[in-house]
Every structure is written in C-alpha cells, then in structure tokens.
Amino acid sequence: MLYLLGIIFCISILFGGIKLALKLTWKLTKFVLVLVFLPLIIAAVLLGGLFMLAIPVLIIVGLVAVVASLSKELVA
C-alpha cells in the first residue's frame, strides 16, 4: 500500500513538473515574440513607407501594454 502511494506521489510530481515547464515555455515564447518580433515588424512597416499603418499600430500596442500593466497592478 505504501509502495502504491509512493508511485502516485512520484507521478503527481512528474506531471507538476511538466505543467511548470509548459507554463515557463509559453511565457518565454510570449516574451521573445513581444520583445524581438514586434519591434522588427513595426520597423519594417516604418521603413517600408507605411507610416499611416504604423502609427495606429504603435498607439494600439502602447495602449494595450498600459492597460495590461495597470490590470496586473490592480490584481496583485
């Protein structure tokens, strides 16, 4: 009986580790996409001469970032 309890405990630790790894991977992917690819896309749009498209995108992304940071402060 104690052996079965040990196996269940080990499996729960294994699945907890997998869950933690997936959460970390998702957060790291979001961080890299926002930090690396979004500025590259906006710079490419600006260099391509599409100022009328780039300026509203910058404003919208800025507003979303401000709202997201404020909502995290309110929740925490």
Image (cartoon, grey):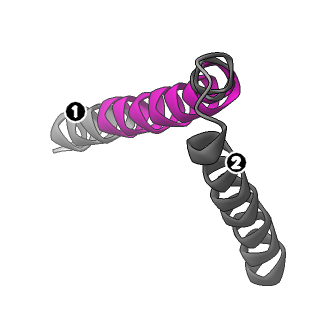
In the displayed structure, 72 sits above or below 16; it is below
In the picture, the disc for residue 55 is 2
Taking 54 as reference, is 65 left or right? right
- Which residue: 62% across, 46% down? 52
Residue 18 position by quadrant: top left
Residue 69 position by quadrant: bottom right
- Which residue: 58% across, 26% down? 45
Residue pushed farthest bottom? Answer: 74
Residue 26 magenta-highlighted: yes
- Crowd tier of the residue under label 2, counting other residues whose Cα lies within 10 Å: few below 14, some 14–19, many 20 or above: some
Secondary element at tag 2: helix
Secondary element at tag 1: helix
- Which residue: 39% across, 36% down? 13
Q: Amino acid at mark 2?
A: Ile
Disc 2/disc 1 C-alpha distance (Å): 57 Å
In the picture, the disc for residue 7 is 1
Q: What range is drawn magenta here?
A: 14-40
Position of residue 53 measured from the top left corner of the image (x, y, whole percent): 56, 44
Q: Nearer the viewer, mark 2 or mark 1?
A: 2
